[in-house]
Amino acid sequence: MPHITLPEGLPGIRGPFAFRPETAKPLSELAEVLLRGRGTLAPAERELIATYVSSQNDCHYCQTSHGAIAAHQLGENEQLVADVKRDFEQAGISEKLKALIAIAGKVQRGGKNVERADIERARQHGATDLEIHDTVLIAAAFCMYNRYVDGLATVAPQDPAGYRERAVKVARDGYLCVQRDIAASQGTGGD
């Protein structure tokens, strides 16, 4: 049960977004830029970083929703997502992505945990400054998103089917669709 009165039928971050649309807009825009915007990391790689950080923060809603999006983008490869969450160093991902997820994991524990050797490892495997920057910001942003969702005790459905269904829409339409969907469900139109 959420700690505050949130709109019914909007699980996870969607409830607080509907509660306070003024903050939903910049948070949705940030997710859009980080997970789908300009960059050389594939959207699925960015989603894996978000999923890993969310799993380390034990945020069921975020790790399940972003894991479903990553799996969809990876041809419905839910096993790879599970492998990354369990032990990314042994998962079937590139050495560059392993190095970036290692950085994200250190950011999740505290930004000062990232060391020069972590950055060098990523660079040795071909990571660019933009990829390192975006990895750090994805990790930091998802710590905020996770705490926002769990700090308000939002509803986090257990059935993975709903997350899979939503993943198709978000992968196709992006993160700004969340705000439009909420506005439409409340009869306020969209942007």
Image (tube, grey):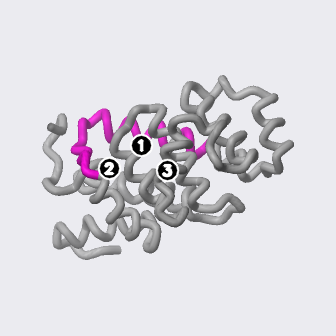
Tell which tag, 2 or 3, sits nearer the viewer.
3
Residue 179 at x, y percent in the picture: 33, 64
Tell me the quarter of the image containing the N terminus.
top left
Q: Is residue 174 above or below residue 27?
A: below
Q: Residue at x 66, y 24 (%)?
A: 112
What's the amino acid at mark 3? Gln
Q: Secondary structure at mark 1?
A: helix
Q: Is residue 151 visible?
A: yes
**Residue 13: mark in rendering:** 2
Region in magenta: 136-159
Residue under numbered circle 3: 79
Residue under numbered circle 1: 145
Alpha carbon separation for disc pair 1 and 2: 8 Å
Give 26 or 47, whichever is nearer the viewer: 47
Q: Earlier in the sequence, mark 1 or mark 2?
A: 2
Q: Earlier in the sequence, mark 3 or mark 1?
A: 3
Q: Residue at x 62, y 43 (%)?
A: 91
Q: Residue at x 59, y 64 (%)?
A: 37
Q: Residue at x 52, y 66 (%)?
A: 75
